[in-house]
Image (cartoon, helix red, strand yellow):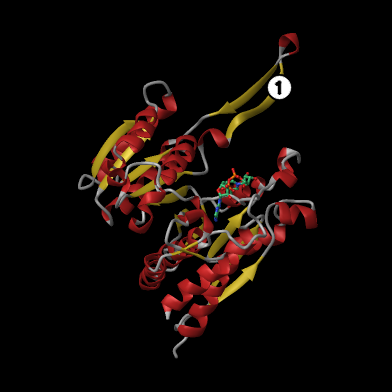
Amino acid sequence: MIKVKKRKFLLLPGDGVGPEVVGEVKKIIEWFNSNKSLDFEIEEGLAGGASYDKYGTPITDEVFYKALESEAVILGAVGGPKWDNLEFSKKPERALLKLRKELKLFANLRPAICFKQLVDASTLKPEIVSGLDIMIVRELTGGIYFGEPRGIEPIDNGERKGINTHTYTSSEIIRVARVAFDLAKKRLNKVTSCEKSNVMEAGQLWKEEVQSLHEKEYKDVELNHMLADNCAMQLLRNPKQFDVIVTDNLFGDILSDQASMLTGSLGLLPSASLGAKNKDGKMRAMYEPIHGSAPDIAGKGIANPIATILSFAMALRFSLNLDKEADVLEKAVQEVLNDGLRTKDIASKGSKEVSTTQMGDAIISKLK
Ligand code: NAD
């Protein structure tokens, strides 16, 4: 067997169900190493509450530098009630924010796909969601979550004031819009750009920059502008009108959660956070399920590993250009669902309920 160059993955299982679902990805990486002409190197590290408990910080410099050196980071989830009362800088979520910010992961890709086998899991009517396939591109390193000034400060009369600042520059808007247009070209060729240009100057700039990029470089892609509140409504009314949605950090946070619930289960949906490509065409990237650490089911062996496994498929596709392997893995997931295997969160009458590890094993058996 001819071996190609080693590709390094950093696994950060994190907290709660994180280690359980990332454990299944590790099995799949090992399967690819043993059965295909691939040679993935796996490193692991602590992040979030697990890192705080051991080192007093949500991410150590050592783990952070490993992330810088790896081809892609696969993260489980961070956080949980145990760490809710820590001061802001020590909270598990700081690990995520630091990785996104320092690795300059400015584009967050969140597909909302409604698997036909699970159409009944959605709260919407089957005809509204069946066959749904939307890609939400959320700007991830700018906007109100990072803008300065920020803080809570005392004001008159014993009151306090909470401050956050929403800012975007032209280049921040253009680089994420470009990701959306490029993705659309490989899909249905349609981009909807969402902002609040009616009430926010930063929204007005967003709309103008996206429009101008479209006119200069992407005239062949269909572009619509939509106010973010209307987009929230349209996602419920007629979600299949969308192909790629591009929006800022705050609206993207909300709209992508809403879109994910159209599909019925948090346990199924992956995400990718991508940085800029360097001269060699390489980019930094982090892949993670959209769900959190699910403390209510952690340790019970019932978490659904599919979202994390599909996140790994996105890593194969976007970071390593291994489209064929990504297709094979996604098809294996579909086949297991066709066989009626379900973890508890997506179980229905007549399905076979399986544990986290049994689901991982079933997917591997389909790879064979
Ligand atoms: P959550 O996504 O952890 O859980 C919401 C519900 O979905 C729970 O009932 C949970 O059991 C279920 N669920 C989630 N993932 C599942 C899976 N893989 N299989 C089956 N069921 C699953 O959201 P939450 O309860 O709001 O947050 C819990 C903790 O996770 C909090 O500390 C929060 O800050 C953190 N969080 C982390 C991330 C992240 O690391 N990216 C994202 C969201 C929330």
Q: At which x and y percent is residue 81?
A: 71, 44
Secondary structure beneath disc 1?
strand
Q: Residue furthest top?
A: 157
Q: At which x and y percent is residue 82?
A: 74, 46
Residue 102 visible in the picture: yes
Q: Nearer the viewer, residue 99 or 331?
A: 331
Q: At which x and y percent is residue 50?
A: 72, 56
Say what amino acid the circle numbered 1 marks.
Glu
Residue 297, compared with residue 281, is above or below; it is above
Looking at the figure, which quarter contains the N terminus?
A: bottom left
Q: In the figure, is residue 297 to the left or right of 245?
A: right
Label 1 CB less than 8 angstroms from ligand 1? no
Residue 15, compared with residue 226, is above or below; it is below
Q: Residue at x 36, y 51 (%)?
A: 119
Q: Quadrant of residue 325?
A: bottom left
Q: Residue furthest left?
A: 220
Give the residue number, with chain letter if any, for mark 1.
153
Q: Residue at x 42, y 24 (%)?
A: 201
Q: Residue at x 67, y 28 (%)?
A: 151
Residue 211, compared with residue 273, is above or below; it is above
Q: Quadrant of residue 90?
A: top right
Q: At which x and y percent is residue 367?
A: 42, 77
Q: Residues within 10 Å of mark 1 (few under 14, many from 20)?
A: few
Residue 9 visible in the picture: no
Looking at the figure, which quarter contains the C terminus?
A: bottom left
